[in-house]
Amino acid sequence: MDAFMNTYHRLPVTFVRGEGSWLWDIQGKKYLDFTAGIAVNCLGHGYPALVKAVADQPARLCHVSNYFQSDVTAAFAEKLIAACAPVGMRNLFLANSGAEANEGACKIARKYSLKKYGPGRHRIVTLLGSFHGRTISTLSATGQEKFHRDFGPFTEGFIFVPPGDIDALDRALDAGTTAGFLIEAVQGESGIFPQEPAYIEAAAKFCTERDILFMFDEIQCGVGRTGTFLGCEAYGVKPDVVTLAKGLAGGLPVGAVLAGEKAASVFQIGDHGSTFGGNPVAAAAGLVVLEKVNNPAFLAEIARKGDKFLDVLRSWKHPHIRAVRGRGLMTAVDLDTEAWPILEAAIAGAGKGGGAEPSPPGLLMLSAGPRTLRFLPPYIISDGEIERGLEILKGLLG
């Protein structure tokens, strides 16, 4: 009997170890990882400094109640605020996941509006194609019907508008009913769709003029994934709230809600909490990630490697490829055929371009809808590994 609930369409492989951009299964077969645990293992597998930090921290302190403070959690918070200071972030709340972080953002928006304007101004606007989490409220904020089936009724007060439609956004951001606008700089789960600069500029203007909190969900596209520390940095805006998770601790669970000047004093004692939020072990890992990633030269390398993905894929002019897009190490390929059989074939190591080994390596990829492949590799991936993985993919496409 399978011990797990039937919630995942799993590929037929069980991993036992990883190193850099590679994973090995229980039979000893190796796989090139273009997924990084869905943007989580940003420094790859077995990154030495992260391994040491996570191994050493429990001997000093594994957990402490948030009624108290730990030195490593305080250091992590200060370093994260410094990394996000260019977009105006002032303070933060630490949680365990992206969904929790987005719940916190919505609570901040609603309390801000309630205290300043009174009841009735509580609506949160998000985009069609968005993904903000799987709790009831973050599902309510997610603009994809496929995630809504069977789980209603949902939290009231969330509405969706088409991305890129400035007129629709203008109508939706009603100053009398709206508390916040929550947006991903790059929509990840729906297929890697960067927002248009003119749209972000208009959104910032509307939110400022109407005193609506402008909130960026950076769960997947933040922490360097797009080649800037935050995805919103590319647009030159200063949001009121930013949420982070996934790669923030390189493989350990952590989430964060960061607030700019307007929102920094909204939460007061008793308004919010999390038993494990800011766990010292996760914070120790997070310090390593911030030290490595929040570096201009390292971020420039992420952007360069992302351009390499796009350049190689576009150079193929492959008959099965309908579109290629991305930013930094977030890349999507739209196909004229189903994506899932290609993921299965890549696990098996089918196709050409696998190298000289008697048993060619597998390739790990993600889907984003029925006909889209998605690549979110670790930041430490080499040029040679990028080329090798894409050659495997090319062979699979035929």
Image (cartoon, rainbow, N blue to C red):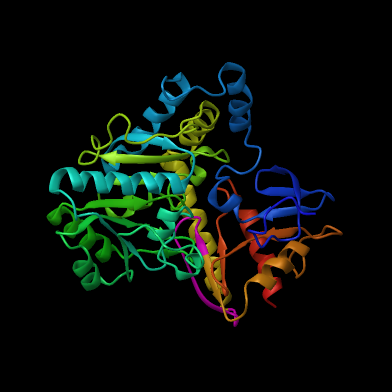
Number of callouts: 0
Residue 88 visible in the current orientation = yes
Judged from this view, the residue extending furthest toward the right is 358
Q: Where is residue 351 in the image (x, y as percent from the top left)?
A: 75, 70
Of residues 21 and 40, the one drawn nearer to the viewer in this rendering: 40
Which residue is at 49% across, 58% downward? 330
Residue 223 visible in the current orientation = no
Vertically, is 3 above or below 52?
below
Judged from this view, the residue extending furthest toward the top is 60
Q: Is residue 328 magenta?
A: yes
Which residue is at 30% across, 59% downward? 157
Which residue is at 20% across, 53% downward? 212
Judge left or right: residue 131 versus residue 40.
left
Vertically, is 281 above or below 389?
above
Quadrant position of the N terminus in the picture: bottom right
Judge left or right: residue 27 versus residue 49.
right
Of residues 185 and 108, the one drawn nearer to the viewer in this rendering: 108
Q: Where is residue 22 in the image (x, y as percent from the top left)?
A: 69, 49
Of residues 5 and 353, the one drawn nearer to the viewer in this rendering: 5
Q: Is residue 65 magenta?
A: no
Q: Position of residue 136 (x, y in %)?
A: 44, 55
Residue 353's quadrant in the figure? Answer: bottom right
Range of residues picked out in magenta: 318-331
Q: Where is residue 314 in the image (x, y as percent from the top left)?
A: 52, 72
